[in-house]
Image (cartoon, helix red, strand yellow):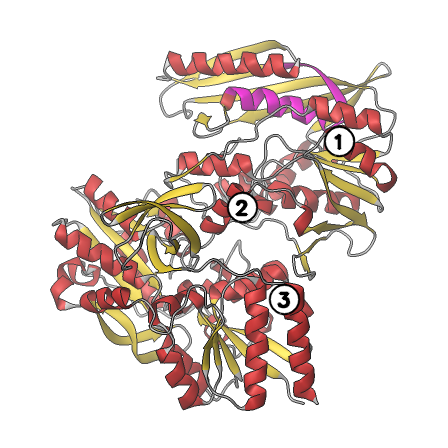
Amino acid sequence: MTTTYRWGNIMCLAIPGKIKKINENQAIADFGGVYKKISLGILNGVKVGDYVLVHAGFAISRVKRREAMDSIKALKELKEAVRDEQN
Amino acid sequence: MENKTVTLAHGNGGRLMHELVDALRLKFSNKILDELTDAAEINLKGKRIAFSADSYVVKPLFFPGGDIGKLSVFGTVNDISMKGAVPVCISLSFIIEEGLPVKDLEKIADSISYAAKKSKVPVVTGDIKVVEKNAADKIFINTSGVGVINYKGRIGAKANPGDAIIINGPIAEHGLSILNARENLKFYSNIKSDCNNLNFETERCLKASSRISVMRDPTRGGVATALNEIAAASGIGIEIDEQAIPIKPAVKKLCDVLGLDPLYIANEGKFLCFVNNKDAKKVRKAIGANARIIGRVVSAHKKEVYLKTKIGANRILPTLEVDQLPRIC
Amino acid sequence: MNKIKLMEVCGTHTMAIAKSGIKAILPESVELVSGPGCPVCVTSQSDIDKAIAVSGIKDVIIATFGDMMRVPGEKESLAQAKSRGKDIRMVYSCMDALSIAKDNPKKRIVFIGVGFETTSPTVAATIMEAKRQKINNFFVLSCFKLIPPALYAVSNSDKVKIDGFICPGHVSVIIGTGPYEKFAACCKKPCVIAGFEDTDILVSIKRLVEMIKARSYKAEIEYKRAVTKNGNTKARKILASVFDVAPGQWRGIGIIEKSALKINKRYASFDAEKEFDIKISATLPKKGCMCGEVIQGIIYPNECKLFKRTCTPRNPKGPCMVSSEGACAAYYRYGK
């Protein structure tokens, strides 16, 4: 039986995962309780404990833990910037 | 119908499926059938009886958190419970493909026994048919269930403006567990199907309030589809608060990684309860610690569901068009 | 005061904006249009027809990403070919396609590669791995494209005037800020590389508004937690060792010089275009389909005559309605 559903688009999604284990060119990444084997083939110098962006099974970049951002504050600032622009 | 042949998309709980249901239903339409609830209410010499039928074709047969046996018992019990009825008994019929290992069948039977005991609903009759190789996929289970309605109010498909919407716990676990088990995605997690009986929780709701209008288990198509169906059937609008919807962190993460919207992913142990706002807190408490009030029924934007996002914007939460996966239950 | 028109280049931004409802809360004077950063959407009709043609060859297994499945070809989509019994599989990673090749030594496996600088290095690394493991039944149909040349094309278009660009976060992870700095200075358009959370997008819009006001034509990184000035140099090196830059055919835009990636001579034995004699009749986009205008920000999806009438997610006429990152799909699902 064929299954032709799709899992949304996975092409441009890249989600940060934490490196748990490294074995040569491969690693296990932890996406908050979801684990996956990933390739380290296109990123240099990855260490256990690093956070990496994973795209299509490959670590593509290290990521810093994000500083908490407030979307309401961001919107307020945007509105102020626009208002200044109109004056 | 628009298509010349039936496609898998006709079975996914979305818009195409409604078209298919109508193509059949209109041929033998009647007042009870036309209500399109999971269980029909029939009057038997003054007694109000809930009667439902269902089929289970889940693939794979065994998945984290459950299997086809457990699913078929709980699913049938839940269909009756959603009608505000106390389930009395169920039937199970098996269509088995030649070649199914007896070991698997025994495992399924054990699971049925467990589920019947847990929900306190006996399996009272059944049937077995064996078909040749490729005429079915391993095993299909067809069920029916009967329950008695003692509730004073009428629980149906129609919600009222002013109702609060309550969900009994975190969403999207069943569909994700099936997807991960089946498609060999190689994601490892402790995400399990939420496959469970809801009859005790709904009985507590019914005791807590006499002003419940709709109960619905958001299975195929998930919470978003169930809400859209109710909005359309009731001619009312629904507003949901994104941040109030309970979801486990690992489930949220896997959805993010796969680009899936958890609001469209199937549940097998969750229900939405629409109750007059005055009784909302009482009902939430009666269900238990994981229950949350996630939204409300309004008289504006009729037949449409709106989602208030994290940043406070309102956007439409549409019906599923195409998508998601077949054979999840 | 004129309206400020900003383009979100990346399809993932288009979807994030739609899902969070950002357009509904933006100040009236700021307008967002979608750009040429949805991989499936910019893929030319001839490339899609090529992929479908390969699926018809005997003993071939096609592996591709989910969104390619439902894009309508001249006669049918890959999903329709699959339901007729063709072996077409969705994969999460190009490496999964290589595993399929190892497991099926008697079949030829063709990975259909669409996407931008984020995805192409993962495919280049897989091709190198295939060579190392001497796997000779694995092929790639490369439809990969580059983002910076498309920015110039949009910016130089006389059909639409964009004041600033919200640049793709994950493409930039690889290419860094260099190409945007050049573009911003050359075309006098500020650029901000944005993350994908609603706050990221709001902050980026704010910075663009400020830069437009100050007439400052720079490229900034908002998505600092992932993007560095230099990008991922290893990934770029791998990319350059497998692919050559070539002219690319973009849907609606036409040919853009130096905007596509083709497998180079060293790895020619993995090139599906060389392995298979792919014949397709000259193909044109579906009649009336305006995906080409949509991806350049020239029109909004609802200005296309097919939109919601004959083109729906269920029965899509163009890729922007198919792709979960497509502007038309976003409009259809979430409204403006």
Residue positioned 57% across, 27% down in the render? B195
For this view, does B228 lie left or right of residue B191? Answer: right
Q: Label 3 lies in what chain?
A: C
Who is closer to the viewer here, A49 or B119? A49
Q: Which residue is mark 3?
A: C22
Mark 3–mark 2 Cα distance, whole angstroms, equals 21 Å
Same chain assignment for discs 1 and 3: no
Q: Mark 2 or 1 closer to N-term?
A: 1
- Is residue B81 highlighted in magenta? yes
- x%, y% of residue C128? 18, 57
Q: Amino acid at mark 2?
A: Lys
Q: Which residue is depicted at the point 36% across and 69% down?
A: C44
**Amino acid under label 1?**
Asn
Callout 2 crowding tier (Cα within 10 Å): few <14, some 14–19, many ≥20: some
**Residue pointed to by mark 2:** B252
Q: Is residue A77 left or right of residue C39?
A: right
Mark 1 lies on a secondary structure that is: loop
Residue B236 position, x and y percent, is 79, 49
Residue A42 horizontal/vertical position (percent): 27, 59
- Give residue B30's mark: 1
Residue range highlighted in magenta = B69-91
Identify the residue at image location x=41%, y=79%. C151
Instruction: Give the percent coordinates (x, y) of residue C188.
Output: 46, 89
- The one of B85 and C187 positioned closer to us in this rendering: C187
Q: CA distance from mark 2 to mark 1?
A: 42 Å
